Amino acid sequence: MAIDISLMCGEPVETEVKGRVFRFSPTNIGDLAYMQDWFVDEPIENACADIKKCGEHMDKEEKSELLKAAREESNVRRKVVRHLETDKAIVERVTDDMNSLFSSISGIIRFMWLSIRKEHPEIKMDELTEYVDAGTAGYINELIAKISFEEQDEDHELQYVAYDPEKKTAD
């Protein structure tokens, strides 16, 4: 298998999504920390959005309970992300929640923005909603994963993943 040297060197990979060409760069540890922070804060963001959307139909106590539950979930997520939680069932549930969120349309939009912002600083995250949908999400997710993370086999030897620039698709 041929190895695309740009992947090994962390060079951007150019590909087209819905008629627009983007240059994707590998994500880094700071980008992953950003995603973890978003995951931890997401319950509170959702609760605030719900209150904003439905607040007139909720009394003060309901709003308070919603925010309290969101803060509690956020604290549990923070403990898991920081490896402070030891309850295996909680760790598994939160890990599943994180994987679901990261592979959702919202998660892929955020990963795409983190990957392209170095080459496209003019693009705002909310602009990417027109490019990421059920038809493109899998491709974008796979491309970012392939250019950002080196896979390892059972012997923990690095296995570089090839990207075919001729096909402009992730294999």
Image: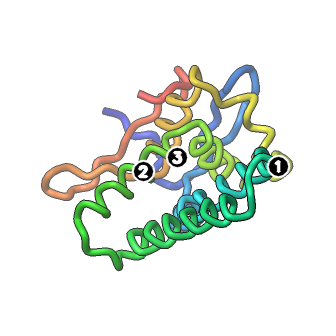
The residue singled out by tag 3 in the image is 6
Residue placed most toward the observer, 115 or 65: 65
Give the Cα separation between the discs numbered 3 and 1: 53 Å
Task: State if disc 1 and disc 3 touch (CB < 8 Å).
Answer: no
Q: Secondary structure at mark 3?
A: helix
The residue singled out by tag 1 in the image is 56
Tell me which amino acid carries mark 1. Answer: Glu
The mark lying in front, picked from 3 and 2, is 2
The residue singled out by tag 2 in the image is 97
Taking the spot 63% from the left edge, 44% from the top edge, the residue there is 112
Q: Is residue 28 visible?
A: no
Question: Where is residue 76 drawn, in percent x and y?
Answer: 43, 69
Q: Reply above or below: 144 against 73.
A: above
Earlier in the chain: of badge 1 and badge 2, it is 1
Tell me which amino acid carries mark 3. Answer: Ser
Left/right placement of residue 66 relative to residue 169 reads: right
Taking the spot 52% from the left edge, 63% from the top edge, the residue there is 36
Earlier in the chain: of badge 3 and badge 1, it is 3
Question: Where is residue 97 drawn, in percent x and y?
Answer: 42, 50
Give the Cα separation between the discs numbered 1 and 2: 30 Å
- Label 3 environment density (alpha carbons within 10 Å; few <14, some 14–19, many ≥20): some
Left/right placement of residue 95 relative to residue 108 reads: left
Earlier in the chain: of badge 3 and badge 2, it is 3
Tell me which amino acid carries mark 2. Answer: Asp
Question: Where is residue 106 drawn, in percent x and y?
Answer: 62, 42
Name the outermost residue toward the left: 155
